[in-house]
Amino acid sequence: MAEEIKVLLEGASGEYEEKKSRFIATLKAVSSEEEAAEFIASVKKKYWDARHNCSAYIIGSRGELTRCSDDGEPSGTAGRPMLEVLSGKGVTDICAVVTRYFGGTLLGTGGLVRAYSAAVKDALEKSELGIVSEGLLLEVILDYNDVSSVRYLLEKRGIDLSDADYAADVTFRLRVVSDISDVIEKEITEATAGRCLITRLGECKIVERIKQL
């Protein structure tokens, strides 16, 4: 089975408030520790007057690299809960920073864990998330007489047909999940009674947007 990776496509901000303390979560897609560090630094610069800017990130197709920071909060009350929210959703290549503006009342260990977790959850729910799968780029050349039948079977499978050239023949360039590429090629061949020419151009990534994880 082709590997699927859950990622952040478009980050958003989330917020949680308790006893006048504000917790502002900001998310960003990252692919390296350097990118995560730059993002954390940029959030700290933006919220320079906040008491804490706690962070957590997960990097790698299998989430091999994880880091978190309490940034002055009691140990285990901020970064770790944030990291657990991200890992619990199965998202990778993502960095979260939660900025806290102190409201004057101590929240205790349980209150801090709840607040930092809630802020990240809120940001995730507002973000654009997706699944990245391993795929193949196929070039399909066919006669105009076969376009309708091929278009019908590909649309049923939800395959994008926007990359097409209409000249003497019709050329579709398709991004197909690796697991079903053999089946797709067989279906196209049968639909055209063998009149098509199918070429595998190479590997590619396929991104499918999802509302929530």
Image (spheres, rainbow, N blue to C red):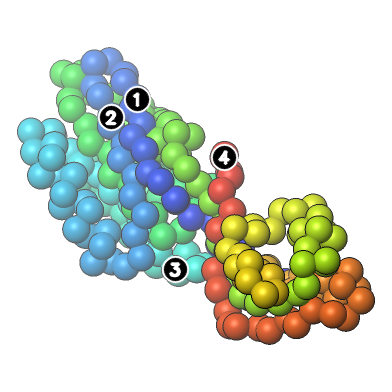
The residue at 40%/50% (across/down) is 83
Q: What residue type is labelled 1?
A: Tyr
The residue at 44%/50% (across/down) is 9
- Residue 130 point in image, percent of width and height: 54, 51
Q: Kindly identify which residue carries mark 4.
A: 212
Q: How far apart are marks 2 and 4 (CA)?
A: 22 Å
Q: Kindly identify which residue carries mark 1.
A: 16
Q: Is mark 3 on a helix, strand or loop?
A: loop
* In front: label 4 or label 1: 4
Within 10 Å of the Cα at label 1, are there few (<14), some (14-19), or many (20+) other Cα atoms?
Answer: many
Q: What element carries label 2?
A: strand
Q: Distance between the residues labelled 3 and 4?
A: 20 Å
User: In the picture, which quadrant includes the C terminus?
Assistant: top right
- Residue 51 point in image, percent of width and height: 13, 34
Q: What element carries label 4?
A: loop
* In front: label 3 or label 4: 4
Please report contact status of discs 1 and 2: CB closer than 8 Å, yes or no.
Answer: yes
Instruction: From the viewer's perspective, tell me whether residue 193 is left or right of residue 97.
Output: right
- Residue 109 point in image, percent of width and height: 33, 33
Q: What residue type is labelled 3?
A: Gly
Q: Distance between the residues labelled 4 and 1?
A: 19 Å
**Which disc, if any, is residue 60?**
3
**Which disc, if any, is residue 23?**
2
Is 112 in front, or is 35?
A: 35
Looking at the image, tell me whether mark 1 or mark 2 is earlier in sequence order: 1
The image shows a total of numbered marks equal to 4
Q: What residue type is labelled 2?
A: Phe
